[in-house]
Amino acid sequence: MSAAGHPVLAELARHRLVPVIVIEDPSAATLLGDGLVGGGLPVAEVTLRTPGALDAIATLAARGDLLVGAGTVLTVDQVDRAVDAGAQYIVSPGTSAEVIARCHERGVAALPGAVTATEVQAALTAGVTTVKFFPASTSGGPAAIRALAAPFAGVSFVPTGGIGADDVAQYLAIPAVSAVGGSWMVPREALRNGDGEEIRRQVAAAVSAATKEE
Ligand SMILES: O=C(O)C(=O)C[C@H](O)[C@H](O)COP(=O)(O)O
């Protein structure tokens, strides 16, 4: 497993899982953080898809016991706002050289999306060696990652999109996969209902499923 680049990417590779979170009410950030830490996975990718996302990032980052990143980052301005809120890594669905350059200027890790050889090459040219393989399940799944890993020997993949508890292990079994992302670990309804115990339970189950592979 290669996790070259920013130390935060090495940390994500160590945890092996990246919970993707859509948070509607930022006041739920505390129970979310407690559920993640309690479940044994102190990692969060908060998507900038809701108005409260930046506040949630700020609350989670202020705790100091979680690796907090921003997801669905499409613009340079969003990079700045997420980093100002405390995000330590920036995840995008696709590859934008401008977004990656701003991440590097701000000293945070960039995790851009790439699912074709051309996209992986563009990401390499922009200076990253870990890419998010998104959307994983509809882009060829594990077989596609294995095929891409052959020519791109130094590249690590973080498959995300359409992955659940039942197939996380088959992705993590691929040497080029450093971590797996997904929203299944923090169910949106549980967050909406303020059900911290359900979040802790799902997170712990994901950690257990990820550990089985090793
Ligand atoms: O837009 C981004 O930057 C993203 O982070 C996309 C998310 O990772 C996926 O939407 C999660 O996919 P599911 O696990 O299938 O819900």
Image: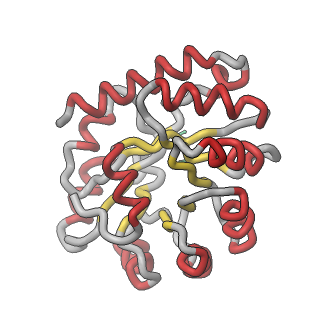
Based on the displayed image, in which of its 4 quarters is residue 191 positioned?
top right
Residue name at image x 54 percent, y 60 percent:
89
Indicate left or right for 50 with 175 as reference.
Answer: right
In this view of the protein, can residue 115 be seen by the observer?
no
Residue name at image x 70 percent, y 43 percent:
59
Residue name at image x 23 percent, y 58 percent:
176
Whether residue 26 is situated above or below residue 177 in the rendered picture: above
Kindly give the residue lying farthest to the bottom in the view shown: 125
Residue 110, given in percent of the width and then of the height, sits at: 50, 67
Query: Quadrant of the image for the C terminus?
Result: top left
Query: Foreground: 140 or 23?
Result: 23
Query: Quadrant of the image for the N terminus?
Result: bottom left
Indicate left or right for 141 with 190 as reference.
Answer: left
Based on the displayed image, in which of its 4 quarters is residue 96 positioned?
bottom right
In this view of the protein, can residue 76 be seen by the observer?
yes
Query: Foreground: 105 or 97?
Result: 105
Residue 195, given in percent of the width and then of the height, sits at: 64, 16
